Amino acid sequence: MPYIDESPTMSPQLSARGQESSGGGDGTDSVLPTPTDGLGTMGEHDASKSLDMRKLVLKDFLACEEMYINQLEALLLPMKPLKATATTSQPVLTIQQIETIFYKIQDIYEIHKEFYDSLCPKVQNWDSSVILGHLFQKLASQLGVYKAFVDNYKIALETAEKCSQSNNQFQKISEELKVKGPKDSKESPTSVTMEALLYKPINHVTRSTSVLHDLLKHTPSDHPDYPLLQDALRISQNFLSSINEDIDPRRTAVTTPKGETRQLVKDGFLVELAEGSRKLRHVFLFTDMLLCAKLKKTAVGKHQQYEYKWYVPLAELVFPSPEESESCPHVHAMPDHDLEDMKIKISSIKSEVQKEKANKGQSRAMERLKKKMFDNEFWLLLNSPSIPFRIHSRNGKSYLFLLSSDYERSEWREAIQKLQKKDLQTFVLSSVELQVLTGSCFKLRTIHNIPVTSNKDDDESPGMYGFLHVIVHSAKGFKQSANLYCTLEVDSFGYFVSKAKTRVFRDTTEPQWNEEFEIELEGSQSLRILCYEKCYDKSKLNKDNNEIVDKIVGKGQVQLDPQTVQTKNWHMDVIEMNGIKVEFSMKFTSRDMSLKRTPSKKQTGVFGVKISVVTKRERSKVPYIVRQCVEEVEKRGIDEVGIYRISGVATDIQALKAAFDSNNKDILMMLSDMDINAIAGTLKLYFRELPEPLLTDRLYPAFMEGIALSDPTAKENCMMHLLRSLPDPNLITFLFLLEHLKRVAEKEPVNKMSLHNLATVFGPTLLRPSEVESSKGHLSLASDIWPHDVMAQVQVLLYYLQHPPISFAELKRNAPYFSTDV
């Protein structure tokens, strides 16, 4: 079922559920399916099963209908005494105000009470041949009353709000309405606000349409109810479509005290750097101003409200040029390894949630896990962004947001600059005007939830886990020659991150990159491509992040559809952006497929060949490919930001792979000319394609047990003993790589690669479960492959990286003191 926001909105948008709903959003963009979608003739067994499901759907709906009637009763309860006082000398409300606030509620209540009283005995005395489609048909034919209710909804809310502000007695009544629990339950009545109850009819009419979908799905086409339910669904869908068309234009508007319309153009959650610390804000861009607010903490049962922080009229808002930008105040940047640790922790909690769902665990345990996941995701959302987005006001004040994506920064900047092209006047809002505007934000907002995965509905797509291969081919549509390149972003853990970057194609209107990248996906649903014009003018330096600011000339986004991408063949696509067309291709490899190691059929090369075979053939202790790649990285890549983390161009990596496999005599010249990230990528690929991981299949379970030991002495003895148990070529190569990675980490202030970052990159490559272990069934979901094993793999490599230097001779000298059994 699509997400239905329970909270009141200034102008509600209704949705009808698609049978093959992809979930997501607030349901406002749902496509109404034809009633017969996905329905056909059923076998006898299927028909019987469907009739059972039909009963379950009806029982659930009956319970919802009972709750809805109780909510309407709670809303009607104060109406009679209010009407009684209206004719006295001290009325709480006038008759007109009462009729406006409670407009059509009595009619809606009577319709649903009659429907419930007719449906209840049929469900309680269930018989598979029972006919009840005529009840739904009659209910659908009475939906006109909802049209009148929706038309009046906005004014009803405004009237209730004004009356609450001017009359304390009515305010108390409207904040503490009591809704009784189900008939046979011992639940005590719950307190709900009048505003929340006035929204219930909006929510319920949408839910009724969803139930009709489910009933049709589980009703055999030859059942007498089938045509009646089809007709009821058709009426409901047409009704929802007409309502949405009527109310949509009003959805984002608010009226200023002067009677002008102030439209909400864009809103979203951003991290603001305020008073030296990171704060999550909800930012609202109106046609004439930018408003920054935060959600207030409210008691259970009370609807949420926003607290105003600051605003800037667009007539006064300016973006500083890079050279004018002041030095960015010190931001405590969270170390990358802390962010990576948190991602692994979140993935681990997700696995626990999946297991609880599968085992139908206690709701209390599930709630605890979900809260823990929300807290961790919120921390990540707050601490990950690092791209500065500065707002200046002509009065001298300035504000700084930190964003995770250049795409997002560009979107906000473009939206503001587009509005500033109009003839805007500056203004000052009074405290009352500000209060009213901030109050309206709750109803106007289009982004309802903080963008974390724990806020998603259960039936929303969890995203894709694995590796996306992208070839950026070319671009057309540039009017003049420029130095051009592209970057790729994907969403992960609720926010977007930059994952890859093409070469700069110089002085051209038709760049031909043809570069391939492998991008790891962690619950990703979208791919963004940004096209930049490279700036070589060093005077245009951004002091916020000490990088030259390149101009975004175009940007676009595609949804990652698993059915389209998850094939062995490349899927070609085009993104159009500001008159520019960028051609690219994609294909996807699931994480479990990427774990498979395929030995090379020919033993003459080095990739996919056992390390012992290669070292014996070369008469070397460490494979030539490892020595050469390490030497080149240490020569000119040790200061490279993100070395081993940034993707190299796949075509360059494949060229180096072919050269090493064929023992090309020009290999040294190729290495000296090649992009350093491609060389780093080649080294990672070599270890990934070994027919057996460097630390061996046989020892994998022992490494997992050893790293889990809590006694430091026992752990030291076990971990050193495991190294001794490795074949000599594996051990010598591992120690060689270990010392290299330590040297890379020594340059962390420059290259931003800590020991933990390097362990995260190399751990799962050097140490993986064998295919036998993986197929035992404990890795069922794609999203589960990550958490537990990967965390341990990273910890194993990190243990050795943090250990004092380990020499081969020393290890072997101590060998006799320990058993050689593992």
Image (spheres, helix red, strand yellow):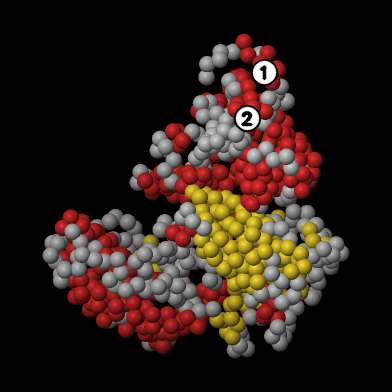
Q: What mark, if any, has residue 614 been given in the picture? A: 2
Q: Amino acid at mark 1?
A: Leu
Residue at image position (77%, 68%) is: 507
Residue 811, label in figure: 1
Percent position (x, y) of residue 605?
A: 61, 36
Along the horizontal axis of the image, is 740 left or right of 4? Answer: right
Q: Earlier in the sequence, mark 1 or mark 2?
A: 2
Asked which quadrant contains residue 620, the reply is top right
Q: What is the x, y in percent for residue 509?
A: 71, 71
| 663 lies above or below 53 | above
Q: Is residue 403 visible?
A: no
Secondary structure beneath disc 2? Answer: helix
Q: Is residue 506 left or right of residue 153?
A: right
* Left or right side of 56 for 370: right
Callout 2 amino acid: Val
Q: On the picture, is 80 further left or further right than 396? A: left
554 or 818, which is in the foreground? Answer: 554
Residue name at image x 30 percent, y 66 percent: 38
Residue 244, image x, y percentages: 42, 80
The answer to whether the residues at label 1 and label 2 have Cβ atoms under 8 Å apart is: no
